[in-house]
Image (spheres, grey):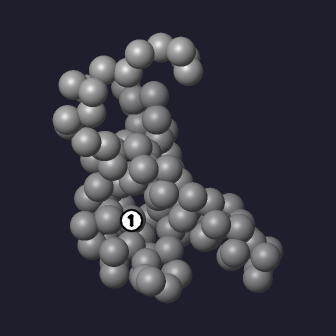
Amino acid sequence: MSRREISTDNLQFGMSLLHGWVRMLEWLLYFAYILYYQSRSGKLEEKASIQREFRERCGLIVDQPIPGFSNVISGNIAGRLFQNPELCAEIINIDRD
């Protein structure tokens, strides 16, 4: 790959944030579950509680398999959540900053 010539025509579109949003949301959810587990003993209950909060307050299914999709968190879901970081941080119970 390092010897392959790079076409600068492909760089005119910029970098897509779509995959960055997906990975960031996965990371935030993972650490929200772990932080809760370290302070209490009900990891599965908290995971379900966070998923329920996202569904009720945002109308979004997070960190659950969606029929017909290969990924449990899509770019559209992550993008919608990061449009309202205050609500996302409140549900996950982390500091917005």
Of residue 10 and residue 61, the one placed in the foreground of this image is: 10
- Horizontal side of residue 42 vs 13, given as left or right: right
Q: Is residue 24 above or below residue 5?
A: below
Look at label 1 and name its amino acid: Phe
Residue 46: name its quadrant.
Answer: bottom right
- Horizontal side of residue 9 vs 7, given as left or right: left
Residue 87 at x, y = what percent? 34, 78
Of residue 5 and residue 92, the one placed in the foreground of this image is: 5
Q: Residue at x 30, y 43 (%)?
A: 16
Q: Which residue is mark 1?
A: 54
Q: Is residue 48 something that shows in the picture? A: no
Residue 37 at x, y = what percent? 74, 72
- Horizontal side of residue 12 vs 68, given as left or right: left
Answer few, some or many: residues within 10 Å of disc 1's Cα (few below 14, many 20 plus, some between 14 and 19). some
Q: Is residue 9 above or below residue 54?
A: above
Residue extending farthest to the top is: 4
Q: Residue at x 68, y 61 (%)?
A: 44
Indicate the quadrant containing the C terminus: top left, top right, bottom left or bottom right: bottom left
Of residue 94 and residue 60, the one placed in the foreground of this image is: 94
Q: Residue at x 44, y 64 (%)?
A: 52
Q: Residue at x 48, y 57 (%)?
A: 24
Q: Is residue 67 above or below residue 26?
A: above
Total labels: the figure holds 1
Residue 94 at x, y = what percent? 52, 81
Q: Is residue 94 above or below residue 18?
A: below
Q: Is residue 28 something that shows in the picture? A: yes
Residue 54: name its quadrant.
Answer: bottom left
Residue 26 at x, y = what percent? 53, 54
Which secondary structure lies at badge 1?
Answer: helix
Indicate the quadrant containing the N terminus: top left, top right, bottom left or bottom right: top right
